[in-house]
Image (cartoon, rainbow, N blue to C red):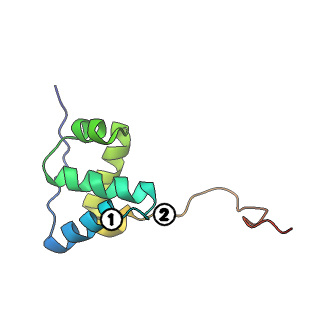
C-alpha cells in the first residue's frame, strides 16, 4: 500500500516559475535541479515513492526536501551550514 505524504504542496505562480527556472538551468548544481524537480512533481500530487523512482533518488531524500519546502517554501531548498570541524587547509592550493 503506497504511503501518502501529509505535506501537500500547492505552488503560487511565482514559486512555480522560480522552480521551473531552477529545474531547466544547466549551470545549476545538480542538487538544486533535483530539489526543484521533486517539488514540482510533488505539486502535481505524486507520492514520494513515485517521485523517488522518477528521479532515481531515495524516498527518504524526497521526504526530507518535501517537508522542508512545505515548512519554509523556497528558502527551505537552500543549503544549511553543516556541522563538524572547520577546514584546516584552504581549498585553493598554493604553488
Q: Is residue 50 above or below residue 31?
A: above
State how many labels appear. Answer: 2
Quadrant in the rendering for residue 26: bottom left
Check contact, mark 2 vs mark 1: CB within 8 A.
no
Asked whether 27 or 90 is in front, the reply is: 27
Q: Residue furthest bottom?
A: 14
Q: Residue at 56% x, 59% y: name it.
A: 82
Res. 22 in view: yes
Q: In the rendering, at what x and y percent does residue 31 appear?
A: 43, 55
Residue at the extreme right: 95
List the residue tagged with mark 2: 80
Where residue 51 sits, quadrant-wise, is top left
Q: Quadrant of the N terminus?
A: top left
Vertical order, 43 against 13 (above or below): above
Disc 2 or disc 1, which is closer to the eye?
1
Residue in view at x 37 percent, y 37 percent: 58
Marks 2 and 1 sit apart, C-alpha to C-alpha, by: 18 Å
Q: Residue at x 27, y 65 (%)?
A: 19
Where residue 7 sits in the image (x, y, percent)?
20, 51
Residue that badge 1 annotates: 22
Q: Quadrant of the C terminus?
A: bottom right
Q: On the picture, is 69 further left or further right than 61?
A: left
* Residue count near mark 2 (Cα–Cα under 10 Å), binned few <14, some 14–19, many ≥20: few
Report x, y in % for residue 44: 13, 51
Kindly tell me whether residue 7 is visible in this rendering.
Answer: no
Q: Which is nearer the N-term, disc 2 or disc 1?
A: 1
Q: Residue furthest front?
A: 26
For residue 68, the mark is: none
Secondary element at image label 1: helix
Amino acid at each position: 500500500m503506497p504511503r501518502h505524504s501529509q505535506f501537500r504542496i500547492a505552488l503560487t505562480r511565482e514559486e512555480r516559475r522560480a522552480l521551473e527556472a531552477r529545474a531547466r538551468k544547466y549551470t545549476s548544481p545538480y542538487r538544486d535541479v533535483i530539489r526543484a524537480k521533486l517539488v514540482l512533481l510533488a505539486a502535481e500530487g505524486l507520492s514520494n515513492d513515485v517521485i523517488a523512482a522518477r528521479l532515481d533518488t531515495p524516498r527518504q531524500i524526497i521526504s526530507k526536501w518535501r517537508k522542508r519546502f512545505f515548512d519554509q517554501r523556497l528558502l527551505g531548498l537552500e543549503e544549511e551550514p553543516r556541522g563538524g570541524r572547520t577546514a584546516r587547509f584552504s581549498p585553493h592550493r598554493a604553488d
